Amino acid sequence: MEVCYQLPVLPLDRPVPKHVLSRRGAISFSSSSSLFGAPDPRQLSQRRGAISYDSSDQTALYIRMLGDVRVRSQVGFEPEGRGSYPYLCIDFRTLHSCSESTSASSLIPGPGFISAGPVSGRRLRRLLSFQRYLHSSRLLWGTTHLNPLHILDEDYIGQAKCMLERVGSWNFDIFLFDRLTNGNSLVTMTFHLLNQYGLLELFQLDMVKLWRFLVMVQEDYHSLNPYHNAVHAADVTQAMYCYLREPKLAKSLTSCDILLGLLAAATHDLDHPGVNQPFLIKTNHYLAKLYRNSSVLENHHWRSAVGLLRETGLFSHLPAEEGLKMERQLGSLILATDISRQNEYLGKFRTHLNQDDLCLSNASHRHFILQMALKCADICNPCRPWELSKQWSEKVTQEFFHQGDIEKKHKLEVSPLCDSQRNSMGNIQIGFMTYVVEPLFAEWGRFSDTRLSQTMLGHLGLNKASWGGLVQQERPLSPDELEPSRPASVTMPTPAITESEPESASAAEPTAVTTATATGATNSKEIPQGRKES
């Protein structure tokens, strides 16, 4: 069976070395001759693993793999549980010729050893890349990979390391970083930041357990979601790091605060189904019933994170009470990202600033500031440079409209902002910036009046103006029409506080909330049912 799939584009700034062209494995090149010197297609076609070159495709090459290929199918409303992603399962022995398999060199075990003989189910693995397969093999053989970056060759290792040296820059391009790490941006980013703060040694975290936890977290993000995926989690984690470095926080936060802040950022949308809470409620999803229609997705993200923490035993060496306390605090941070509680948290933040009574030596005040920092990181896309912000806007709008298409298909009421025939990307973004992002970041700027805050507000204003210009180009509008419409507000019943919600998150619920959110997004599957929780 012959299967083709597209690998990430990894552009080079110099010609590809000959030893790279002749090596085995998964290498992706841009087909633009100006990037890597236009290698002869015949050279590529002669490589082991059968790389095909299509000069008409200016985005990437396709790797053609011959052999026993098993593709997992998705039918109907099948849940996408942990470890069930539709990647290919391949027996890599079929990539080599029989003559090579029987050669003397193939009888010597090693990192690239692939034995001959009948295929066993034990040898077939679901994997996301050649690198993950090789890494898992090294772990089983007791040899660890010294370099934590699972990328394709030294050129990309150098570029990714160079980017990590500037991880505190607000212009950090997470999309490029994800390509350079071969889709492992969340694992690489989070591990690097935890290590940079010295948290592994301070909390005596087992490196193997931590790595396993981060890999499982990354896998539990649905890669088919255009927006709510592991790249978004990596972007939020990088933004959270930028906020943690702000002077007021850097001199006040404890190591435990930093650990919880980074872990909450990495897991804040864990196992997101790609649809918003109203969709789950009106389709009678079991998660909506489990959490009584209150912060449904956020409770699920938190419980999923706790499940992985316990499965990997990352905090098992800590006293039981300390472990439970950290789990509750992690939940309180994640629950704060519920956009339906935006007015509640914003009002509390504004009151503290007006009364000037925030004392960061107080643990509860520090925790509240962490909540606000995570809320800012979660919706900071409009505050990024235009080139990055526009990409995020396109992705979240794609999820919005996909949910609307599903609702139309099943004859459900179409959610606000999800109807592609009544909403445009520009109008959605202008309304979101005006009524959700600007009020939050204006208060954050009052709390932390730094260069970063001014930069974010500056980008926000420029991006809003850019979207206004694009809207005008699409259809000339009158001045009245250019005024963004306020997102629909709905009256929601005050939910009962369930046992699943941390104590710190049990404040009174607002009765009227704004439902327009560019991060409460939509789906890439039809009415996913997820995995049930005990």
Image (tube, rainbow, N blue to C red):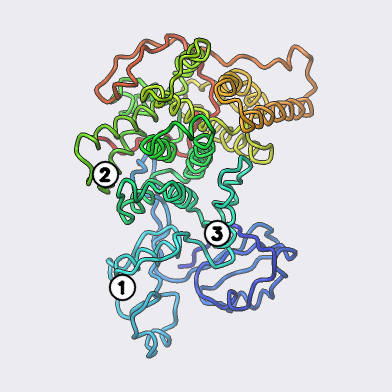
Q: Residue furthest toward the bottom?
A: 104
Disc number lying in front (3 or 1) = 3
> Where does residue 398 sit, x and y in percent of width and height?
57, 35
The residue under the point 30% across, 24% down is 501
Q: Amino acid at mark 3?
A: Leu
Q: Amino acid at mark 2?
A: Phe
From this view, report whether residue 56 is shown above or below residue 490: below
Q: Residues within 10 Å of mark 3 (few under 14, many from 20)?
A: some
Disc number lying in front (1 or 2) = 2
From this view, report whether residue 351 is shown above or below residue 111: above
In the rendered image, the quadrant that contains the N terminus is bottom left
Q: Residues within 10 Å of mark 2 (few under 14, many from 20)?
A: many
Label annotation for residue 119: 1
Q: CA distance from mark 1 to mark 2?
A: 38 Å
Observer-nearest residue: 346 or 15? Answer: 346
Q: CA distance from mark 2 to mark 3?
A: 36 Å
Q: Amino acid at mark 1?
A: Val
Residue with the mark numbered 3:
7
Disc number lying in front (2 or 3) = 2
> Where does residue 371 sit, x and y in percent of width and height?
43, 26
The residue under the point 27% across, 26% down is 500
Residue with the mark numbered 2:
315
Among the two numbered marks 3 and 1 on one chain, the one whose residue lies closer to the N terminus: 3
Q: Secondary structure at mark 2?
A: loop
The residue under the point 44% across, 31% down is 252
